[in-house]
Image (tube, coloured by chain):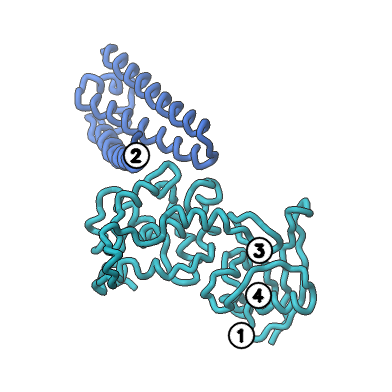
Chain colours: A blue, B cyan
Amino acid sequence: MVRESSIMKVHYYTGLAAIVLVAIHVMFRLTAPGGYYASLEYENVIANYSNVSYVVVLELILVTVAIHGFNGLRVILIELKQGEAWERAVKWLCIAGAIAVMVYGTRTIILASMML
Amino acid sequence: MKRVRIIVQRYNPKVDVQARYDEFEVTAERWTTVLDALLYIKAHIDHSIALRYSCRMASCGSCGMLINGIPRLACYTKVYELGTDTITCKPLPNFPIIRDLATDFKAFFAKHKSMRPYIINEDIDDSNAKEFIQKPEEVEEYLQFSYCIKCGLCYSACPTVATDRLFPGPQALAQMYRYLIDSRDKAIDERLRIVDDRHGVWRCHFAGSCSSVCPKGVDPALGIQLLRAYLLGHGKERKKIAELYIKKL
């Protein structure tokens, strides 16, 4: 069984990583040719997917936020109610939720990059 | 001298459906404590009020109650220092009520006991019993945590205890740190396993209310954060952190 300290280490590291990655993501917008508002136009947004480093950052944000967010949800839910069956259900639902979000998000990133 | 109104929550879970509030008027001197006022009421006005007390000098930790919304020791709270003519006394939150202001400490003590609050050291030679030698700086690392009188005020102020009944609470976790950091104790891994749990040390929100209500100046929130640091692998820096804290004091 994974120790709670190991899970919480992952929780803290993904939280910190998400802050850094989102900052990088915002920097992509701010430093885009044509300025911030032009970078939000549909063609420019889709064009971003030709930039491998942009796609990698986007995927990493997806993974870190999904892990951090669903673990946070697990923590809140097991604090609200206790019991072996409830806690087991919460654990697997959160794992399933995180995987579902990562799979769906990755699929979206792949589809967007295929539109180019 | 002034007249004050004391409002006491009355509730007997075996008989009453819900709590009621009884009001009493007493005369308070500058030195009158809330416990003095309650004992006056019990002796002269209403004998049936249930409350727990013993030493009357903030040493036994028996008379904890919610006084004007804050967990305090009744014997350590002067009527005058509250700055009001109306004082409301309720039982400590997060504890089952036995009757009126007396609460049940069974779960609280069980959690304290589960932390194994004693020195564990297999290297001790029982046949040749002699004192442990400790440096003053080794004592300083845990000294403040040893001032805990187990009054339960921190436990009653803790928002996590209010929602998670399996959370050990600030008192037990601070005592865990107190023994973990003791240079005489040799059961670090065993101790860390106890608190490294789904409902263990990680569930603290660091609200800090435990430290602000402690009548003995103990900082359980610090103990919990140091325990977490230990689990995150910063145990070697514990001495530095403790020294910084002592300097701050």
In space, the residues marked 2 and 1 are separated at their CA atoms by 52 Å
Disc 4 packing (10 Å; few <14; some 14–19; many ≥20): few
Of residue B224 and residue B193, the one placed in the foreground of this image is B193
Q: Residue at x 41, y 33 (%)?
A: A70
Q: Amino acid at mark 2?
A: Arg
Q: Nearer the viewer, mark 2 or mark 1?
A: 2
Mark 1 element type: loop
Of residue A39 and residue B78, the one placed in the foreground of this image is B78
Q: Amino acid at mark 3?
A: Ala
Task: Answer with mark 4 or mark 3, whichever residue precedes in sequence.
Answer: 4
Mark 1, residue position: B31
Mark 2 element type: loop
Q: Amino acid at mark 1?
A: Trp
Give yes or no for contact between labels 4 and 3 (Cβ–Cβ under 8 Å).
Answer: no
Q: Nearer the viewer, mark 4 or mark 2?
A: 2
Evaluate whether label 4 is on the same chain as label 2.
no
Mark 4, residue position: B84
Q: Residue at x 62, y 58 (%)?
A: B104
Disc 1 packing (10 Å; few <14; some 14–19; many ≥20): few
Mark 2, residue position: A3
Q: Residue at x 26, y 74 (%)?
A: B136
Mark 3 element type: strand
Q: Nearer the viewer, mark 1 or mark 4?
A: 1
Evaluate whether label 2 is on the same chain as label 3.
no
Q: Position of residue B126 (x, y in %)?
A: 30, 64
In space, the residues marked 4 and 3 are separated at their CA atoms by 24 Å
In space, the residues marked 2 and 3 are separated at their CA atoms by 38 Å
In space, the residues marked 3 and 1 are separated at their CA atoms by 24 Å
Mark 3, residue position: B102
Outermost residue, top direction?
A115
From this viewpoint, is residue B107 visible?
A: yes
